[in-house]
Image (cartoon, rainbow, N blue to C red):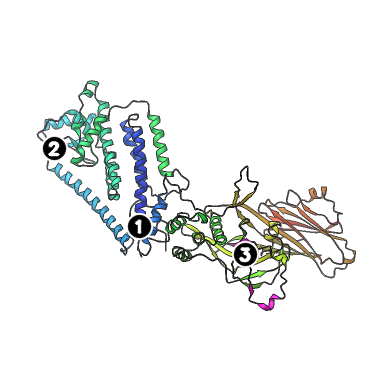
Amino acid sequence: MRWRYDMENIWSFLLQTLSVSLIGLLLLVVKLLLRNRLSPRWQYAVWGVLAVRLMVPASTYGKDIFLPLPLWVETVKLTVEQGLSSAYTAFYEAVRVVAPVPWLSGGPVSVTDWLFLLYILGVFGMLGWELFASLRLRRRFQNGEPVSAQEFRRLQRMGEREGRTICAAVFLPQLTSPMVCGVFHLVLGLPANKPVEETAILHAFLYPTRWNILQSGFWRVCRALHWCNPVMWFFLRQVNHDWVSFCDHQVLERLQEEEQEGYDPGRLTGTSAIFDGEKDLKEQAEAAERRSIAPKGRTLVAVCVTVVLLCSSLLGTVEKTVEIRPWWEGDGSRQEMVAISHCNPCTTAAGALDTYAKGMMQENPLYCAMASPEARRKQLEDGFLRGEGQKTASETVLLYPAVSYDQAAEAPVKVRLEDGYRFDTDRGYRVQNLKEKDGGQTGLLILYLYTVPEGKEFVEKDRFDDMELTESYLPSGQLVCPVRVWREENRYVVEETGERAIYLSYDIPNGGAEYCERMVPELEAEKAVGKYGTMTVHRWSVYQVDNEEKAETSVWDWERGSGFCEIPKPDAAFSVIRWPWKVSYQCVDGWQDRENLQMVGLHVMPLIEEGEQPDFSELDAYLDISNLNASGSDNRGVSWNHCRVDETWDGEVTVEGVCETDTQGLAVRLIWNFEEKESFTIRGGVNDGP
């Protein structure tokens, strides 16, 4: 099912009209504070902010304006739609608006569908009424009584002074003051059997520009789109009043001082109103009488206020008011908690992996649902709304014993879990070996464990005796989950693609993280055959999100340090990326000079820049190559290891390291009895040879 990008249901309309209403209330407050300080021109022009907001969908930007309207609408939607099978509303998707006009996508099924259909019929009914009113007005002007030729010439001269050219002038008994009708061919209408002052005609001539007529049509369309919102009707009435006052202000600017004293705007109501209606005439007159020529020199202030209001209405004022609360603070309704998860889609691959991992660690179905594909998301959310929990432990899982501090056994056993996992929430998780595949990324999601689950029962009992489980295994392990992350419509999702496995370790909580990182399968491995043996290069990639959370301390609390943030970060980016590597050299069997061999060493230099050539001269300057047990690394990432050769040596020498940036390759040289015997350069998985 695709995401609803248009205003396709009653909830998207509700979010849009509430967002616009909130902006209108903000404008009213600002106008009230500045009503006597800025000109009527600005009092009307500032409604342009509302006009822009009417054209911009509510879901265009990620920020909210003061209030968490998306959360409130989503919560109401989940409460009402639960149990309904609406054709227009996607129950498992957040309410979004990316088009400011409604769109019908099929026939109605539920009550909310019928309400939306009723709303659309109301829109067409309002637009039809506006069209009928315009045609009726045009008909009245066509049937009006023409003025005399002498009067018409006088009116033409008045219009030309104001840049208006009229093609006709007629008397209409329905008018109480002059008005001009038309877009390309202007016709002046005058009240029948009533004297008309020139100031009233001047007031009428100020209105009929194409721009004014277009904006009048725009406000009428907006009134139709929000016909069922009484707050919008109030706003548009205020727009009408400010427009009348602005026209009066323009008339006053053109009159002499003595003429201004006799100017009565109350006589001009109906001349330039955006919306017709006799019930508004008295209010328009009162609004016009309150206006006078405003103090000048405040244009810059008006521009600054308008720009601030426009930016606030479009971009929002709060980064995100709908935040994910900790699982243990979920004291709201279940619908509200699901609504919060809907309002926080995973916008990055890192955010999806972070959310999914924390859902596993806390056995939180909503966290897992936020980062799960649509079918799995529906299953998790339905269970949560029914009060069911989430159990992330599998029935069986592969278990790899550790044969060394950084190496797992090749052959696993299967373990049946009964009590679930015990995750080390202080250490959290990590992601390894991400690579592009099938329109997404595949990799390993790895979570740290306190202990191997108790009460385990081995499926393959004949393997149990061969596996030496000792107390050294019990402190820790790591759960490895093969995953794929990709973009599904407007969010990233995670799916497990293989069987989970537990890698036991001697000292994960106390040992270095790089040892754990090399226990799991590598991202890539290359081999190079030399004169004296075979070199193998293993590479991994490690990704982490910054989840460090400072511990709260006081003068009475001696606790220090930091913890792991257990709240999902759906917009996260990887803050730590590193590339562990391991190079091993296995000497050929039966080498004839084996009895004369005293030491074997490996020196490895990461090549960072493209085309970079290996240069070990700096290492040679300070490394004592005659040291039989030398090992270490420097600040350039160069690592070395020397092995003393005796009867127990197995013919292999190994060097490990970590690069903080991606490398173009590795340069390796073999030291044999304190002399360089071979060198290799491996670039991008291609062996350049010895």
Please name the amino acid that badge 3 sits on: Val
Please name the amino acid that badge 2 sits on: Val
Tell which circle, 2 or 1, labels the residue nearer the N-terminal end. Answer: 1
Q: Is residue 79 left or right of residue 452?
A: left
Tell which circle, 3 or 2, labels the residue nearer the N-terminal end. Answer: 2
Cα–Cα span, label 2 and label 1: 46 Å
Q: Which residue carries the number 1 mark? A: 8
Quadrant assignment for the N terminus: bottom left
Picture quadrant where residue 40 is located: top left
**Residue most extreme to the front:** 556
| Magenta stretch bounds | 443-469
Cα–Cα span, label 3 and label 2: 86 Å
| Residue 161 visible in this rendered orientation of the protein | yes
Q: Is residue 372 left or right of residue 684?
A: left
For mark 1, give the secondary structure: loop
| Residue pictured at 82% horizontal, 55% vertical | 630
| Residue 97 visible in this rendered orientation of the protein | no
Picture quadrant where residue 534 is located: bottom right
